[in-house]
Amino acid sequence: MDAIEVHRLHKRYGDTVAADGVDLSVPAGSVVGLLGPNGAGKTTTVECVAGLRTPDSGTVRVLGLDPRRDRRAVRAVLGVQLQEAALHDMLTAAELVHLHRSLHRTGRDPAELLDAVGLSAHARTRFDRLSGGQAQRLSVALALVGAPRVVVLDELTTGLDPASRETVLDLVRDLAADGVAVLLVSHRMDEVDRLCDRVLLLDAGRVVADATPAGLVAAAGLGEYVRFRTDAAFDRAALLALPGVAEVSRAGHDVTVTGGGGLLGPVGAELVRQGVVVTGLRVERPGLDEAFLALTGHRSRADRPATAGEVAA
Ligand SMILES: Nc1ncnc2c1ncn2[C@@H]1O[C@H](COP(=O)(O)OP(=O)(O)OP(=O)(O)O)[C@@H](O)[C@H]1O
């Protein structure tokens, strides 16, 4: 049994289908990212996991428990940080962490946790006087103060400066290393790439990909580019004839060979064989950003999104 298991989750608001048969699972000790364009159903999905919304149909389990039926038991094992936390304005950061700690039988040391999110210096600052980024880090601390075994984080680094972001990302890495299951909603591809063991891509309420970050890029079928510079003439047809090469284009001294399947070795060898002197020979692979666009933005490639099975990796 995985720590989070969602099976065929359906949720609609009036005519809007927010979740249309979402399947997802998060094993203990792993970070799973939920990606997707605005309105794809990410928040709806995590709110159902957190027990804040009731699914129309489908099942949601957190450590085998139903977040709606077994509310109290789930609260003891699940930490949730959602996009907009409504907190008591008059309390200080430290008071809020202590208050949330008191709701749990066991948990983390409030002072250590404030330190871990970089808020020690603001422990005595009232919530309504914290900056946006500080309030965001406090909401992460509140989600973790009960030492949960399962954590749901919705856009946890939004509004954070680069140093604070690194602090929070380290914290998430430590959670997974300690065996915590983390479900993370994010719009930042670099963050997902660095943190997540798997990525689920949602589009219009459906899972269109469920893969490792590298698998998602591969699933997008975007291939790779070999680029180099030369002022010499070369045999373009011989390059085109190499296995995997789809296109060879030249703009002045800059040459791009497009294709797939490990182009660098064969292209390099062919240029040596031709005695062509080049500089800056390198391979470039599309990243998650490009994969995201290809898998959700170019529906014209097919009339419907690919199914998870088609792009699982
Ligand atoms: N309470 C609600 N009432 C009506 N429609 C809603 C409600 N909450 C969400 N929706 C709609 O459901 C769809 C999914 O919304 P959701 O917030 O789950 O998407 P999201 O992927 O989290 O988006 P974003 O990236 O913008 O946060 C959207 O079309 C949204 O307008």
Image (cartoon, rainbow, N blue to C red):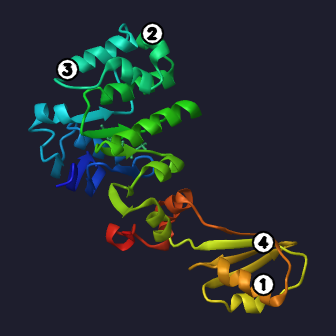
Residue drawn at (66%, 72%) of the image? 225
The residue under label 4 is: 228
Q: Earlier in the sequence, mark 3 or mark 2?
A: 3
Callout 1 touching callout 4 (CB < 8 Å): yes
Residue drawn at (49%, 50%) of the image? 194
Q: Is residue 193 above or below residue 291?
A: above
Q: Earlier in the sequence, mark 1 or mark 4?
A: 4
Return the residue nearer the eye: 99 or 13: 99
Q: Is residue 69 above or below residue 261?
A: above
Callout 3 touching callout 4 (CB < 8 Å): no
Rendering coords of residue 89 (x, y %): 37, 11
In the picture, measured across the screen, residue 38 lies left or right of residue 78, that is right
Q: Amino acid at mark 1?
A: Leu
In the picture, measured across the screen, residue 65 lies left or right of residue 216, that is left
Q: In which quadrant of the rendered image does the N terminus lie?
A: bottom left
Rendering coords of residue 285 (x, y %): 60, 66
Q: Amino acid at mark 4?
A: Phe
Residue drawn at (76%, 78%) of the image? 249
Residue positioned most to the left: 69
Figure quadrant of residue 21: bottom left
